[in-house]
Image (tube, grey):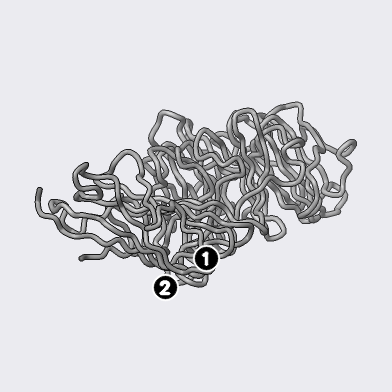
Amino acid sequence: MNAYRIQGFRGGIADDPYQGVRESFRFGYGLNIRGDENTLKCNQRLKEDVDSDTVVTDLILFFVPASNGNLYGFGDTGRIYRKQSGSGAWELVYTDSNGAIIGAAEYTNNDGSDNYVPYLYWATETKLSRIKLSGDWSTDVEHDWQSLDGDPSWHTMSEALGVLLICDSKDLAMVDYEGGFNLDAIDLPLGHRNKCLFGLDQLVIFGSTKGDKVEEGWLWTWDKIQPSWIQRRMVAERGINALLQGEFLLIQAGVRGGLYFWDTSSLLRIKKLPGEYGWVNPGGVTIMGGLPLLGVNGSDKCGIYSYGRLNKNDPYSLNLEYIPSHGLLENVLIGALTMYEDKLLCSWKNDSDFGVDIIDLNNKAEARYEGLVFDGGESFTQKGFRHIKLVTKPLPQDCSIEVFFKVNQQAEWQKATMQDGSELFDKEGISKAIFTIETGGDEEDPGAGEEYELAMSLHPNGNNTPEIISATTYFDPLGIL
């Protein structure tokens, strides 16, 4: 009898159903694959943050963790929200009559009286507004402080090169340290629309699009000294959506899930997000414990993905870390991500419902693992798959594991059963289980076929999780028929 063993899970989601980097799998979600030990277990779940389900009534596109200790959220219908501590509730503090807020940031500059104070800046389609962080929202908002050239989609802004830079159609607008405003700090050729930007050492890198029907995204650099851009590089995707600096500069481009590396010299397409489509908002990225996170939209596998590694000896891997609290993988939007008081927050829209999620430190998430297609190197040989053995850490109370399989890429997963007929491995304190394959494949010989896939659903209890060390499927070659 032969054995197909799955052990080690750090490879993350593979690009191909049949092969990937070592220890990769076809798909999964809610899994912790970067723990101290190389086992498979549940990640923490997301829950709705305090009062967000009633207070937040539009999609937050940008979070700003401010230097006064507050967190601010800027919505796509003009609402501005505030959270005054990690355990504090969300509150609505202002509504901008100009509509969708499509860029926001904090920046310290001269208030006109030689006082250098922090401001919150935000932009709507044609206007830039601001308020001192110490100001009163009922009286001190400088509404329509400046006019912009105008862009209906994005005015992403960030402090870079010592100034506040603002995407504004084909231009970058600028607020300097003395409080001066420059509408056209840099000007791109006609047809380009700046969408995202990021300060990197002595440069600012910004990404542009040429519209929804043009397969051209452009990366640009500038140093604030030169009268125009320094470098540009075309990416054959429908625009540059988001930039994120982790171990390297990570770029999400286009609507088909492209992830790129660029060091201002070499451009490399390094990964594709799962599904036919997938894209990230400019504000939908953050770094958690050194790991880049991306809030993915437009896919049938939406959620918060990580791409990277935590140790130099680990592979760069893609993992669907979190599903928002609504529990849906498609037909939802993720607006923005941020870290606040060392906790991840995520804004989302589900039909007409909106919310902000935060990591639940007291509860694990339901998790799913789906392995690669296995053919034993002989796709022409029929095999009889008979038994599946799980080796685990001692199973915590009220936790359980379900096991599924497919033969010859069937449309539906078949459920394996234990020898006593049970469909769940749920015996507290036990560290191994044997499942049998009694259906699927050839009707006269259940479990027979040329190709095989294994899936496992992990069911936690509170903050306790099943922890799988290995899963081994035993099979016999049956011949060529």
Residue at x-position 44% and y-position 55%: 318
**Element at badge 2?**
loop
Q: Is residue 268 above or below residue 430?
A: above
Instruction: Answer with the quarter of the image where residue 196 lies.
Output: top right
Front residue (pair 398, 133): 398
Q: Is residue 231 left or right of residue 5?
A: right
Q: Tell me which amino acid carries mark 1.
A: Leu
Q: Position of residue 303 (x, y in %)?
A: 52, 45
- Looking at the image, which residue is at 51% across and 39% down? 297
Between 273 and 390, the residue placed more toward the observer is 390
**Residue 142: which quarter of the image?**
top right
> Residue 266, how many percent across, how many down?
37, 57
Left or right for 462, reference 20:
right
Label 2 amino acid?
Asn
Q: Mark number for residue 427?
A: none
Numbered disc 1: secondary structure: loop
Q: Which mark is residue 395?
A: 1
Name the residue at 60% across, 33% down.
350
Viewer-proximal residue among 126 and 376: 376
Mark 2, residue position: 313
Q: State the residue in front, 24 or 145.
A: 24
Which quarter shows the N terminus? bottom left
